[in-house]
Image (spheres, helix red, strand yellow):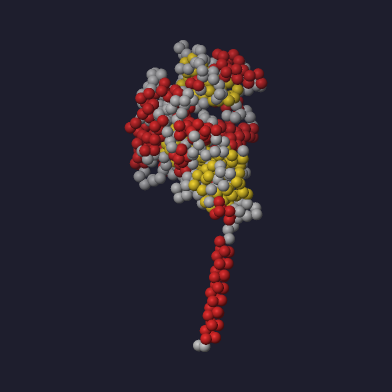
Amino acid sequence: MTGGKRKNSFKLALFLFCLSIIINFSFNSACKRIEPADLVLMNGKIITVDEALPQAEALAVRGDRIVAIGQNKQIRRYIGDKTQVFDLTGKLAIPGFIDSHGHFTSLGESKMVLDLTKAQSWEEIVAMVAEAAKNAKPGEWIVGRGWHQEKWVKAPEPNVAGLPFHYELSRVSPQNPVILTHASGHSCLANAKAMELAKITRATQDPPGGQIVRDKKGNPIGAFIETAQALVRRAMNATQAQLSPEERESRIIKAMAMAAQECLSKGVTSFHDAGVSWRTIELYKKLADEGRLPVRIYAMINEGNEVLREKLSEYRLIGYANNHLTVRSIKRVFDGALGAHGAWLLEPYSDLPSTSGLNTYPLEALRETARLAIENDFQLCVHAIGDRANRETLNIFEETFKAYPDKKDLRWRIEHAQHLHPDDIARFGQLGVIASMQGIHCTSDGPWVFKRLGEKRAEEGAYVWQKLMKSGAIICNGTDAPVEDVNPIACFYASVTRKLADGTFFFPDQRMSREEALRSYTLNGAFAAFQEDLLGSLSVGKLADITVLSQDIMTVPEEEIPKTQVVMTIVGGKILYQR
């Protein structure tokens, strides 16, 4: 080959080589062209609760899913002409808070009745009822919620175990029946008119699992504990039954809407509704179908065993309406609350030795519920506060698990698990039982736990978060709203400090780290609902449920945490609350 030909051949080869590079570069550039996101958050501190990428600066959302998360320069590529871009200016973004135990409709209803949570005395409550009676229609029920006798500055006179007699309530509202629910929901107060309508007299017997509080002569004082409340509520329900079905449904839907707005304003994107009827589930479905259920609901069915046998499979719902409603768990209330001396204890109350509390649901009936749950692949969630209630629940769980060894990954839960015998703590981890607890209960109840249990029992088993976690148990967090404010910030603060209102600390060795507390309110809540592949962390492919806070609760001084405000709440990539 001559020199000229070799030279021309070399030029041709060089040209083809360069052309291939240009073509390859153009092809790769086209392949790397990214479809714009619908929403981008930039310049923030994003705590993902994902071990693969614990922290980031920005993320991108397309539809209802996270499509990218990382540094600002990586996420800028997802910004298009129609992308909604928010500059977080350094603010903290975290996975949307999951309240793992509350009462959704009751939360909304609590905004529609007398708010007794701030009352500091019985006299103050009586004055509130008197004012309401002035404006009430003849025969209209006056309803309130949120009182707690342990939070009053002085005990009423006369009283039984701190509970007031109805006389003053009856005096200020002689023609209007009154029912006032305790903050815990486990007791109520009623006036004479309400007891008259309920046909409650000295001869009325205590129902199983309940107590009509009486004076020394055996006369009802107007206080009703646990299942005894139903005696009064039936009379109120009879009055409400006179409303048309449309009026009753409208009232419930209004309560649900108010609950949703309250949750969103507090950064809560998912809510585990601890005990609902079939009717409530139908309303949830209706609202979800109409796009009016903005908060994701994980509903626990609370119906009798006969109804469960008939309808359980029919009402199983997983991710209904674009993951806004899931029904795959059953709720049972096994004992009462500590404040009302209703928690079922192994030993008598220190301040009321005549009682060890109340078992509010028969053991054999709970065993049957457990059988129905495991045979139909339903999670069982049992309210148990006292140490005996927890032990009996664990016993039934263990019996059921052994009877069905082929059933795995059950994730059965004990709701509250507040007061445990030391011998039962390790059983949570051994059995894989989730402790669904409320951090805020520890600091709210702390001032009077010693009175109820004595110091030894309180130290050994009251709100023992670290002991439970060391057993291998998963703890999910929440507020039990409307028992407590649905605000996760207050609950987070209680979880990491265990600091009481007087500045003292309730066994601080059991407090959570900030990382543990955040996980209990996000990924652990998702796990407790079988939703960890969808929720609980900010990860590519998961639902874009995000809460943006005004300051970094992971680093600010402890005393600054309660000042934190919710700046933005995002559910499924949609901004549903913005401060």
Q: Nearer the viewer, residue 502 or 268?
A: 502
Q: Nearer the viewer, residue 217 or 514?
A: 514
Return the x and y of residue 480 as percentages of the image width and height: 50, 32
Residue at x 37% of width, y 40% of height: 472
* Image height of 492 relative to 234, above or below: below
Residue located farthest toward the bottom when viewing the structure as drawn = 2
Residue located farthest toward the left when viewing the structure as drawn = 423
In this orientation, does residue 228 appear? no
- Count of numbered tags: 0
In this orientation, does residue 40 appear? yes
Residue located farthest toward the front when viewing the structure as drawn = 3
Q: Nearer the viewer, residue 357 or 529?
A: 529
Return the x and y of residue 229 as percentages of the image width and height: 51, 24
Residue at x 53% of width, y 23% of height: 147
* Image height of 298 relative to 357, above or below: below
Which quadrant: the C terminus?
Answer: top right
Return the x and y of residue 527 as percentages of the image width and height: 45, 43
Return the x and y of residue 5 as percentages of the image width and height: 54, 85
Residue at x 52% of width, y 84% of height: 6
Q: Nearer the viewer, residue 431 or 212?
A: 431
* Image height of 243 relative to 173, above or below: below
Residue at x 59% of width, y 39% of height: 567
Which image quadrant is residue 112 in?
top right
